Image: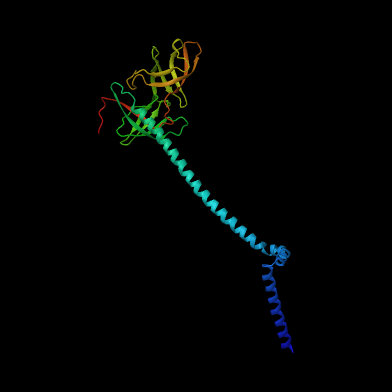
Amino acid sequence: MISGRYSRFKNAYIWWVAIFFIIVLVSFKYPVGQQFQLAIAPLLHVVQAPVRWYQSFSLWFEDSSELQARYNILHLSHDKQQALAQQTEALRVENKQLRTLLNIKQLQSYHWRVARVISRGPESKSRSLMLEIDQAQGDDVIVSREGLVGLVDESSTTYAVVRTILDASVTVPVTMFESDLAALVRGDGEHLRVDFVPMRKAPKIDDVLVTSGAGGVFPAGLPVAKVTQVKAIDGGVFAEVLASPVASWQRDAWLAIVAKSNVVREE
């Protein structure tokens, strides 16, 4: 009896499934099927929502990853181009400085060579430099395209240490063109001070002081400093004069080393 009931249930189940499939097939072919689809559309929309969300999330994740990869590539390319542009600009500036130095006129009884700056002192206004050059001698004069920089203090076969004119140990005899001024410039670390200037011969602000050649260390006529301040000292006999270097060794990559021609050097 139980088997008979199971057989009838099985037959009924098969018939209902067959009818369901027939209805589904008919719904896609005849207008009544369209109404059926409209009726079950909300249910299908709800059932399919998780699938749509998953697909949307997958597409978003793929798009985001692709965009991030493209951004990283573009960022890396931009950094490389920027570094190349900076390197090109640095080389352009160095070449310009070198060409300018190569156009320096030879001074009578002196010869000069070009040297590369490899380090600067830690001060904000460097009082010392290191140059890459061989066979430099103590007290060789260092100049830039603008004017006097300093003196060689120490040297080896491959480098030279330079004291700039901001160093207090360097004293430079100076004058002015078309003037009988004779004074000494010395550094105080930040500025240049001009000693022994009579008030009646005191230079004016923005006047340029040049080497006088006195003492035989510095060639005559090299620009040294531009006057920034002139003030009478108590009594009014002498003037207190401050100046700034005309040479810009803080940024120059190349400098020239000037030596007397009668100095014998090993080649």
Residue at (70%, 75%) from the top-left corner?
19
Q: Is residue 14 above or below residue 252?
A: below
Residue 2 rendering spot, x and y as whole percentages = 73, 88
Task: Classify residue 141 by image quadrant.
Answer: top left
Residue 175 rendering spot, x and y as whole percentages = 39, 16
Here the colouring is rainbow
Task: Classify residue 187 by image quadrant.
Answer: top left
Please indicate whether residue 63 sits to the left or right of residue 209 in the image: right
Residue 138 rendering spot, x and y as whole percentages = 32, 29
The answer to whether residue 152 is seen in the rendering is no
Residue 110 rendering spot, x and y as whole percentages = 29, 24
Please indicate whether residue 229 sits to the left or right of residue 220 in the image: right
The answer to whether residue 81 is seen in the rendering is yes
Task: Classify residue 18 by image quadrant.
Answer: bottom right
Please indicate whether residue 156 sits to the left or right of residue 243 in the image: left
Residue at (39%, 22%) from the top-left corner?
171
Residue at (67%, 63%) from the top-left corner?
48
Toward the viewer: 156 or 13?
Answer: 13
